[in-house]
Amino acid sequence: MGRSETASPVTAVDLRFLQRFESCELPEAEWTHLAHVRVAWTCLHLEAPEMALARIRKGILRYNTDVLGRRHKYHETVTVAFTHLVAVRMLAAEPWGDFAERIGDLLDPGNPVLLRYYSASRLFSDEARRQFVRADLRELPAMRRGMQPVG
């Protein structure tokens, strides 16, 4: 999505959340799947998709290393594909709370959304962890006009 002509829905609270994440001040207990999505949502509102993805990637790698001590847990395909899905679902002026309420299917641990696009063997492969791999079951949804794909 990146910058748009409409006023950004990103609030001071959203920016503080992002700052706490990027400075590794966010407690591990708060680094949930929803928090990952919020980081993506915030970055995508602040920057063009490719720049947002670079920021998200850098932040997750740093957090995984500095806070969790688990840099090896970073998964490139999950990061890229999920950032893409968040970008596709975003509405220009929709605040974080409204977005979070609307995207329940992206948050459902019982039905992982990426398995609609990827076979488990492809998504959970070592190759997919190291580098972005394209979906093998069906293409990720197209981004709206004027948006550049991530990945």
Image: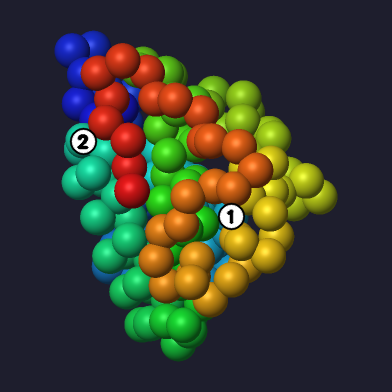
> What color scheme is it?
rainbow
| Identity, as a three-letter code, of the amino acid under mark 1 | His
Q: Is residue 81 left or right of residue 22?
A: right
Toward which corner of the image does residue 9 lie, by quadrant? top left
Q: What count of labels does the image hold?
A: 2
Seen from this angle, which residue lies furthest bottom?
69
Secondary structure type for disc 2: loop
**Disc nearer the start of the sequence (2/1):** 1
Gap between marks 2 and 1 measured at Cα: 22 Å
Instruction: From the viewer's side, name the closer residue of 56 and 21.
Output: 56
Front position among marks 2 and 1: 2
Q: Which residue: 46% across, 57% down?
A: 133
Q: Secondary structure at mark 1?
A: helix
Identify the residue at horizontal 39%, vertical 66% (top origin): 131
What amino acid is labelled 2 in the image?
Ala
Picture disc at residue 33 = 1
* Residue 109 appears left or right of 50: right
Residue 19, percent from left and from top? 28, 56
Image point (41%, 59%), residue name: 132
Q: Is residue 96 left or right of residue 124?
A: left
Residues at discs 2 and 1 in contact (Cβ within 8 Å)? no
Would you place residue 89 above or below residue 63 in this image? Answer: above
In this orientation, which residue lies closer to the viewer: 14 or 64? 64
Q: List x then y, in percent, for residue 102.
A: 62, 25
**Given the current orientation, which residue lies at the most extreme top position?**
6
Q: Is residue 100 above or below residue 31?
A: above
Which residue is at the front of the view, 136 or 66?
A: 136
User: Which residue of the protein is positioned furthest toward the front in this rendering?
Assistant: 136
Circle 2: is it few (<14), some (14-19), or many (20+) Cα within 10 Å? some
Q: Residues within 10 Å of mark 1 (few under 14, many from 20)?
A: few
Farthest residue in the right direction?
Answer: 110
Q: Which residue is mark 2?
A: 48
